[in-house]
Image: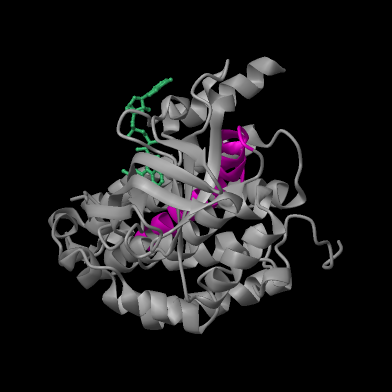
Amino acid sequence: MNPDFGTYQLAEEHEELRQAIRALADKEIAPHAAEVDDQERFPTEARDALVKSGFAAVHVPEAYEGQGADSIAACIVIEEVARVCASSSLIPAVNKLGTMPIILSGSEELKRLVLPSIASGEAMASYALSEREAGSDTASMRTRARLDGGNWVLNGTKCWITNAGESAWYTVMAVTDPNAAKPSNGISAFVVHKDDPGFSVGPKERKLGIKGSPTREIYFEDCTIPEDRIIGEPGTGLKTALKTLDHTRPTIGAQAVGIAQGALEAAIAYVKDRKQFGKAIAEFQGVQFMLADMAMKIEAARQMVYVAAAKAERGEPNIGFITAAAKCYASDVAMQVTTDAVQLFGGAGYTRDFPVERMMRDAKITQIYEGTNQIQRVVMSRALLRG
Ligand SMILES: Cc1cc2nc3c(=O)[nH]c(=O)nc-3n(C[C@H](O)[C@H](O)[C@H](O)COP(=O)(O)OP(=O)(O)OC[C@H]3O[C@@H](n4cnc5c(N)ncnc54)[C@H](O)[C@@H]3O)c2cc1C
């Protein structure tokens, strides 16, 4: 046997990172999670704590004043925050989602314009792909951008934009060539700032879960931005947007794993304490088997998420299957595990006096955003059939 055998073991730095972010999440974020959900308010305590400790956007490369943390490290941060508060975990998660298009395809000037402010925590970034009539079918979007002199002028509405109103920067996909032979080749990506003329945000959606993370429409009414705010070449916007998802679906998987882990821990504590038939309910084998299944699924999901993140970090080609599989599997696990956690709490689990009903409501979104789990299965099956 070789105790130094490192395969299938996270680096020591990753474990140290986990300890640090878990301590911070337990101390600074967990105490506010129920109130944030109840009052449907932005978790400012979490944002301040994450920014102060440098955990709000660990993925930003060092060249742009960031920490240059790898994809697994970014997943660990999101997972550990989600373990106590899913809404708060959207701060690092959406900062990554909003900036990946720029990191992947943006000019040097754009990177310098946006990334240092995200790294320092002075600003947050959002990602605006979806529209009311263009959800799963992203290429059918209607938001337009046209070149007018030295500026791009945007018109249209994006919807479901996470952290809209809190973010300063928005990565926005819009049609620049409505006559493109293939609609997907007529879409470009842009960077819009909240203070750009013609930009505004709508009211908060009233949601089932992640209530601390505002979700809003954003409006472009002759919104005018400089010509160099385009990300990459005209017509490459949808490719950049979808390539981004290869890097961020593991982060949603990590969020799902974190939510599930939080629910499992709450359930373990409860079943040891709760007594029925003269003994702790943890002594019933039916309960024990439920815990075993929950933990088994979480561990499988976690490992798949880390493998997907590692492949994205290495820039491996054809990672559509594994990144979609990781997001899909982990989010299905989060839904199953949080539902079982509510079950193990009995009637108490159905009340807002315990955290598991919040976790169950929060878990649901992980099956829907960044592509529904049906769309993840479309991505996976396409990869399989392509051979
Ligand atoms: C809280 C929240 C936050 C979000 N944050 C963001 C964000 O920050 N940025 C952003 O751009 N978007 C965001 N979204 C949008 C999200 O990605 C979309 O809601 C999602 O992609 C689904 O689109 P849709 O809601 O239009 O559903 P639809 O596309 O109308 O789907 C409805 C149903 O039909 C199924 N379906 C559709 N097409 C197929 C198919 N080909 N095969 C099988 N089934 C199919 C879907 O799986 C789903 O079950 C967010 C959404 C929510 C609710």
Q: Is residue 347 left or right of residue 248?
A: left
Can residue 201 be seen here? The reply is: yes
Q: Where does residue 2 sit, x and y in percent of width and height?
A: 86, 64
Outermost residue, right side: 2
Quadrant for ligand 1 reads top left
Q: Is residue 286 above or below residue 61?
A: above
Is residue 350 a member of the stretch shown in magenta? Answer: no
Which of the 4 image quadrants contains residue 6?
A: bottom right
Is residue 242 a member of the stretch shown in magenta? Answer: yes
Residue at the image position 15 percent from the left and 62 percent from the top: 352
Q: Nearer the viewer, residue 327 or 301?
A: 327
Q: Nearer the viewer, residue 157 or 204?
A: 157
Q: Is residue 119 left or right of residue 346?
A: right
Q: Is residue 142 above or below residue 1?
A: above
Q: Is residue 126 above or below residue 155?
A: below
Q: Where does residue 249 sit, x and y in percent of width and height?
A: 54, 45
Question: Which quadrant does the C terminus fall into?
Answer: top right
Q: Where does residue 97 sit, x and y in percent of width and height?
A: 52, 53
Judged by its main secondary structure, the magenta piece is helix
Residue at the image position 60 percent from the left and 42 percent from the top: 246
Residue at the image position 52 percent from the left and 32 percent from the top: 176
Q: Is residue 309 left or right of residue 162?
A: right
Q: Where does residue 306 sit, x and y in percent of width and height?
A: 63, 52
Can residue 26 be seen here? The reply is: no
Question: Which quadrant does the N terminus fall into?
Answer: bottom right
Q: Is residue 44 above or below residue 360?
A: below
Count of picture labels: 0
Q: Which residues are magenta?
A: 234-263
Which of the 4 image quadrants contains residue 237?
A: top right
